[in-house]
Image: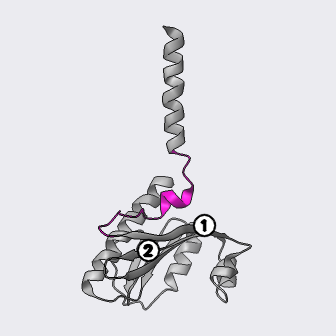
């Protein structure tokens, strides 16, 4: 009986640990379907210090000076062929995320209450939480779409808090 109990415990522990073994980009980026109609376009990509320039040619150096660790990015599509991109920058320290966030837009931008600071700007949402700076961008601009951006931001913020 004891031997069966030990095996059962090991099996349950293995299943629990397997659930935690998802790559961080799958745990932090929004899952397709996390809001109605959200589809992933391609796989998530992760960029490090050595290849950030491939994604941000011309802007990489600034992020590297601000303690850049890695970037998680993925493209998505919503019904009506609305395309959007989620970029999540992981930085060495929360101060770096805050500094980069402060550079993002005019001081009178609309604060939406996500993360430790957030703004909505012409088809994009930018916020930060701890050492993460998040940017959700699209060419779509409407009050209805602002709600979609806010919903996605809330999901990402929750995902960040889960991995911290």
**In this orientation, which residue lies closer to the viewer: 11 or 122?**
11
Q: Would you name the residue on which mark 2 appears?
A: 76
User: How far apart are labels 2 and 1 at the CA level?
Assistant: 28 Å
Magenta-drawn segment: 20-37
On the image, the x and y values in percent for residue 115 come to 41, 68
Q: Would you name the residue on which mark 1 appears?
A: 93
| Residue 33 can be seen in this image | yes
Q: What residue is at 45 percent from the left and 57 percent from the top?
A: 161
Examine the image and state in which quarter residue 137 appears: bottom left
The mark lying in front, picked from 2 and 1, is 2
Q: Residues within 10 Å of mark 2 (few under 14, many from 20)?
A: many
Q: Earlier in the sequence, mark 2 or mark 1?
A: 2
| Residue 70 can be seen in this image | no
57 left or right of 159? right
On the image, the x and y values in percent for residue 65 come to 69, 79
Q: What residue is at 33 percent from the left and 85 percent from the top?
A: 110
Element under label 1?
Answer: loop
**In this orientation, which residue lies closer to the viewer: 92 or 13?**
13
């Amino acid at each position: 009986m004891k031997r069966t109990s030990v095996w059962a415990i090991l099996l349950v522990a293995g299943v629990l640990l397997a659930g935690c073994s998802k790559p961080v980009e799958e745990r932090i980026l929004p899952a397709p379907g996390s809001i109605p109609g959200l589809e992933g376009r391609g796989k998530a990509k992760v960029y490090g210090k050595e290849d950030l320039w491939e994604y941000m040619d011309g802007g990489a150096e600034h992020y590297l000076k601000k303690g850049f660790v890695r970037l998680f990015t993925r493209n998505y599509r919503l019904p009506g062929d609305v395309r959007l991109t989620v970029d999540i920058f992981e930085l060495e320290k929360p101060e770096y995320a805050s500094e980069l966030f402060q550079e993002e837009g005019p001081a009178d931008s609309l604060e939406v209450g996500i993360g430790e600071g957030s703004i909505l700007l012409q088809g994009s949402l930018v916020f930060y939480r701890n050492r993460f700076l998040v940017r959700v961008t699209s060419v779509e601009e409407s009050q209805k779409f602002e709600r979609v951006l806010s919903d996605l931001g809330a999901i990402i913020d929750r995902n960040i808090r889960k991995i911290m």
